[in-house]
Amino acid sequence: MTMTSTLLCLAATIFFEARGETTDGMYAVADVVMNRVAHEKFPDTVCRVVYFPRAFSYTHDGLSDHMEDYPQPDDVEARIEAFIIAKDVLEGNTLVGTTATHYHTTSVAPFWSVHKDFAIDGQIGVHIFYTCSGYC
């Protein structure tokens, strides 16, 4: 697998945001990144979407953003799966195919989640997914 910054940015987001989820949950997180890239109110590259200030919690939680710093067997498996899913999504494939531009875990209730411009798409694992129709 050829490593590019785009692949690494997407794989890291899948890993850090959804490594405890099912494969569908991991694909859904990747969909959010790609849907933001395609949306006019977000940056137009994967890495710029991922590293937009405070867009994804793992980029500003004070912990390492390097997947290799997490060497437990489950983490190694999740890293491999994250790269496989990222490559697949970057090639235009997805198992879920959501229109979601946002998500959060069930353990939090961000201010934006009750805004009228956010429609709930559904829940996969512990993540609730939303599509933004305006405010974003």
Image (cartoon, rainbow, N blue to C red):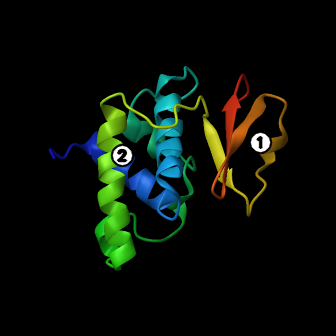
User: Residue 88 in the image: x percent, y percent?
Assistant: 32, 38
Q: Which residue is mark 1?
A: 112
In the rendered image of this protein, does residue 63 appear above or below residue 8? Answer: below
Give 60 or 100, whichever is nearer the viewer.
100
What's the residue at 38%, 45% (across, down)? 10
| Residue 90 visible, this orientation | yes
User: Residue 59 in the image: x percent, y percent?
Assistant: 48, 57
In the rendered image of this protein, does residue 9 appear above or below residue 116? Answer: below
**For the residue labelled by badge 1, is the local secondary structure a helix, a strand or a loop?**
helix
Numbered circle sitting on residue 85: 2
**For the residue labelled by badge 2, is the local secondary structure a helix, a strand or a loop?**
helix
Give 36 or 71, whichever is nearer the viewer.
71
**Residue extending farthest left:** 2
The amino acid marked with disc number 2 is: Ile
Tell me, yes or no, whether the two marked residues, 1 and 2, touch with CB atoms within 8 Å: no
**Residue extending farthest bottom:** 72
**Lateral position of residue 33 relative to residue 92, left or right:** right
Q: How crowded is the residue under tag 2: few (<14 C-alpha within 10 Å), some, or many (20+)?
A: many
The amino acid marked with disc number 1 is: Trp
**Lateral position of residue 44 relative to residue 107, left or right:** left
Foreground label between 1 and 2: 2
